[in-house]
Image: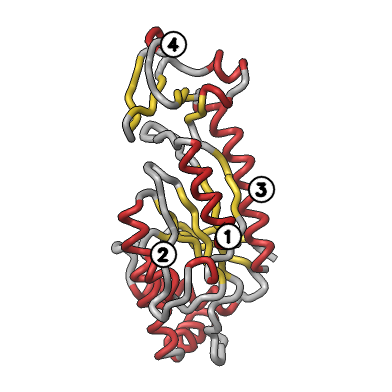
Amino acid sequence: MTFVIIEDPFRPDVSDAAIDNMFAVVSATPHHAYLITTTNTKRLLMVMQRYQRQPSILEQRCSDLLGTRQNNPVVGFANVAFTYRIHRQNAAAAGMPAFLSAPVSHRILSVCPSEPVHLEGFASEDGRPWGALIREVFVEGTTGPRAKPIHPQWIRNIRAQCRTAQVPFSVIGLGDWIAEDQCTAIQAELAIETALVHVGGGFTVVGDSQREAANGDIKMLKMPASMSKSVGAAKKTQRYDDLLRQVA
């Protein structure tokens, strides 16, 4: 068995032909497990509905690419965990209905919040609530020059929503930023000068010398890239392995 991760094949710059070729291989290799992430759920829905209407598309692609013919190749792609990546509430509002309505077997939410995200009230086009259709929700922080901090309360709120909906919840990592009251002495010592303070719904940058005097409900420290990446990469690899084993 092979675990394969595919990053957003539903981007506008990816042709329908390329998507068809990819899913022909996926449908012809049910012994492999796939994790496919996307932020373009409307195109995901359109592609899956097209396969339902015209299963011969994948049958022909399998024949052309692999020299084999797959009879009735699409049954929700049981070997794929489709993962919708959410950053902001307006994106969730635009993409969740299509994601919940897509005729697939496994749906996962990857929430990388840059603001509070609320999942309550989302449903598929036929009225099924989000909690009945999502296999798992996990929160993941961002890394790199444009990494944004995640307020711990945002994570707690998502966890509470998952508990209410009875959906499994986990945190892969917090990315480059860590709450000052949650880091160890070593992490605090290694944190670079930049600190962010959450005030009035947004994060404000303060210098290291101002950190103690700043007023805010939480202070976030930016960890060195080497520390955040080594910790985050290990957790992400382990979690992705767990997710892929579930659909294998």
- Of helix, strand and loop, which one carries label 1? strand
| Disc on the earlier residue, 4 or 3 | 4
Which is more foreground, mark 4 or mark 1?
4
| Disc on the earlier residue, 2 or 4 | 2
Which is more foreground, mark 4 or mark 3?
4
| Disc on the earlier residue, 1 or 2 | 2
> Badge 2: how crowded within 10 Å, few (<14), some, or many (20+)?
few
| Disc on the earlier residue, 3 or 1 | 1
Residue 244 position, x and y percent, is: 64, 61
Which is more foreground, mark 3 or mark 1?
1
Which is more foreground, mark 3 or mark 2?
2
Which residue is at a point 68% across and 62% down the rendered structure image? 245
Tag of residue 136 = 1
Amino acid type of the residue that numbered disc 4 sits on in the rendered structure: Glu
Q: Nearer the viewer, residue 202 or 81?
A: 202
Tag of residue 238 = 3
Which residue is at a point 38% across and 66% down the rendered structure image? 41
- Of helix, strand and loop, which one carries label 2? loop
Q: How is the image coloured?
A: secondary structure
In this image, 228 relative to 241: left or right?
left
Query: Can you identify the residue that label 4 sits on?
Result: 212
Which is more foreground, mark 1 or mark 2?
2
Query: Can you identify the residue that label 2 sits on?
Result: 121
Q: Is residue 124 above or below residue 232?
A: below
- Of helix, strand and loop, which one carries label 4? loop
Give the alpha-carbon distance from disc 3 to disc 1, as whole Å: 15 Å
Amino acid type of the residue that numbered disc 3 sits on in the rendered structure: Gln
